[in-house]
Image (cartoon, coloured by chain):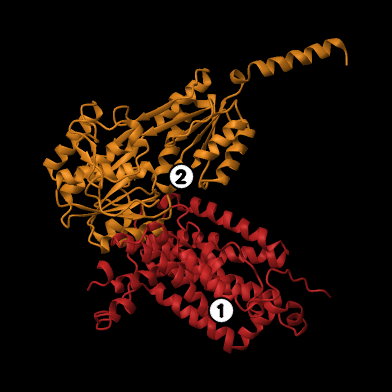
Chain colours: A red, B orange
Amino acid sequence: MSGLAGIDPIAVAAALIVASTPILLAAIGELVAERAGVLNLGVEGMMILGAVVGFAAAVATGDVWLGLLAAAAGGAALAALFALLVLGLLANQVATGLALTMFGLGLSALIGQGYIGVRPPPAGRLDLPGLTDLPVAGRLLFAHDVLVYAGLALVAGVWAFLRYTRAGLILRAVGESHDAAHALGFGVRRVRAAAVVFGGACAGLGGAHLSLVRVPQWTEGMTAGAGWIALALVVFASWRPWRVLLGAWLFGGIAVLQLNLQAAGVKIPVEYLAMSPYVVTIVVLVIISADRTRAALNAPAALGRPFHAAG
Amino acid sequence: MTTTTRLLAGAVLALALAAPAAAEPAKVGYIYVGPIGDFGWSHEHNIGRLAVEEHFGDKVETTYVESVPEGADAERVMTQMALAGADIIFATSFGYMDPINNVAARFPNVKFEHATGYKREHPNVALYNARFYEGRAVIGHIAGKMTRTNVVGYIASYPIPEVVMGINAAFLHARKANPDVQFKVVWAYTWFDPALEADAANALIEQGADVIMQHTDSTAAMAIAEQKGIYAFGQASDMKAFGPTAQLTAIIDNWGPYYVERVGAVIDGSWESTDVWQGMKEGLVVMSPFSDRIPADVRAEAEAMVAAISDGSYHPFTGPINRQDGSPWLAAGEVADDGTLLGMNFYIEGIEGAIPN
C-alpha cells in the first residue's frame, strides 16, 4: 500500500517507533534521576558502554536477552560510579557527568576492540501469530523488537510510579527539597543513588538497542550524540514521562520521516527536511514554555544541588 | 656568572636552536573527523599514519585526535598540536578547510596538509586529494549490472563537490551498463552517525533499492544490506567483515605512501606547498577484491575499467555528457578538467531530484 508519493505510511510509522527507542529509553532513565535531583550529563557515556557490553555479551552467549541484561548492568555500573563520586564524595555533578561521558566513550572503544566486524545474534521480534498479520496494526504495533515495548512500558511505569506510589512521592520530595526530605527521615542519598543507577540501566538498554537491533554491529562512537539528545529531551518534556515519549517520537520520528521523504523523492527541498526535527523541537518548546511560571515549576527544585546532611 | 659559562650557555643555546631536526624526531599530527574505529574514512587515514610510523621508526613521533567536529573545535585542536611542537599536521576532512587556513596563518613554521579541500591561503598549507570518482565509476558499472529492481540507493553526506562528483560518476556508469537504472539519493548531513545511516539504508530499501552505495563513513549501511540480503559497496575501507555476502567490492583509500612521502619531505627539508590529486594510477584509490557474486563477465568488465583508468587510457568523465537540465557539458570525446570536477555543483542528465544548497 502506497501513500503520499510512494511512501508507505505504516512502514514510516513503524520505523519512527524503532528509531525513537534508544533516546526514549535513555531519556526516561535520566528523567527519574533528575526528578530525584541529580543531573547526570554522562548519558552518552552510559549509553555507549551499554551498547558495547550488551553487544559483547550477546555475541559471547548467543543470547540477545543476556546481552540486554548485560547492557543494563553495564550502564548501571557506570551510573553507580557516578553516584559514588557525586553523592558519596560530593563531586561537582556537571563536571563528573562530562567526565563520565568521556570515560564511557574511551572504555567502550577499549572493550569493543575484539568485536569489530562481528555480527550479533538476531534480536527477537515479538511475533504474535494472528496479531502480527493484521493488515495495519500488525506491522505498526506488533512487529517490533522487545525493547520497543520495554520503552513504552517504562514510560507508563515511571509515570505511574511517580504519580501514584509512595516511593515515587519520596523520590520527588528528594528532588524538590532534599533538606526537607532529610528532615522527614528519608535517605536522600540512598534514593538518589537508586534513581541514578536506574537511569544508567535505562541508558545502557538504549545503547544496546543501537548495537543489537538498529544497526546490528559494534562501531566506536556509534551513539553519535544520542545521549545528548536524550538529555535535551528531558528538559523538552519538562520532566513529564508522557512528554518524553512525545518528544522522542517527534525528534526520532521526524528524523526518520525526512529520510523516507528524501528516498521517495518528494519535492521538498532537503534543507527543510533536514532541519525539520530542530524546528519542530523549537516550536514545541515555545508552546510548552509559553506559561513561564508553570514551566519553571516543573523543574525539580533541588536539581543539580549537592546534598550534605548537616548534623 | 662568569664569561666562560655565559659563552658556554650561549653555545649550547645556539646548538639547540640550530639543529632541532637532527636531534628530535619530526612531530606529525593528525586530526580525524570520526573515530579511528569507524572502519571507513578515518580508519584508513589512521592506517596511513601507522605506515608513517613504521617507515620512519624513531625519526618520527605521531599523534592524532579523533572525532574532531568540523569547525571551531578543529581550530582549537590544531592550535594545540602546533603549540605542542608539531612539524606537520594532516587535517583529514573537507570541513577543516577554514580552520586549517586560520591556524596556518598563526604558525608559519608548521606545515599543514588538508585532505579534499580547495583553499590554500598560506605558503605552509598543502592540499591532497584522491580521485574517488574513479572507484565510483567502477561500482556504478557493477551496480547497474547487479540491480534487479533498477533502483540504486545512495547515502550522501553533505552537498559538496566531492560527493556530487561521486554520485555523477556512479550514475553515469550505472546508466551505461543499464539504461533503466535509477538513483535515489538521501542526504544524511553527517559523516558519521551509524544509527542515522542505518535508517537511511532502510528508507532506501523501502523505496525499492537493492544496491546501496554510501558516502558516509560508518559500516552501518553495510550491516543493514547484509541483514536485508541486498548488495552494497564498502566506502573508504574494505567492509567485508560487516557484509560478507552483501559487499560486492569496496573503494579503498590507500593514504600510506602519500603520508610517507610528505613526512619524508619534512624531515629532509624539501617540503613544499603542493596540490595533488592522485587516483588509481598512483595507487591511492584501490578496489578491494571483487565478490564472487558478481558474474564473471561483469567482473571482467570492471577489471578492464580499473586497468584503463589506471593506465590513463580512460577518464570516467568522458563526453558526451549533458547536465541534468539537458544542456551539454562535455562534447563527444571531451574529458572533464580537474577544476570543473573539484567545483562540481550540478547533476548530470538522468539523475532525479535536486542538490540541496
Q: Residue at x 32, y 53 (%)?
A: B354
Q: Quadrant of residue B25?
A: top right
Residue depicted at 37% across the width and 36% down the height: B342
The numbered mark 2 sits on a residue in which chain?
B
On what subunit does the disc labeled 1 rest? A
Q: Which mark is residue B36?
A: 2
Regarding residue A259, the answer to whether it shows in the image is yes
Quadrant of the rendering where the C terminus of chain A is positioned: bottom right
Can residue A198 be seen here? The reply is no
Q: Residue at x 83, y 13 (%)?
A: B5
According to the image, label 1 marks what residue? A240
Q: Which quarter of the rendered picture does the N terminus of chain A lie within?
A: bottom left
Type of the residue with mark 1: Arg
Which residue is pictured at 68% across the width and 72% down the height? A303
Q: Residues within 10 Å of mark 1 (few under 14, many from 20)?
A: many
Q: Is residue B312 left or right of residue B271?
A: left
Residue B254, relative to residue A13: is it above or below?
above
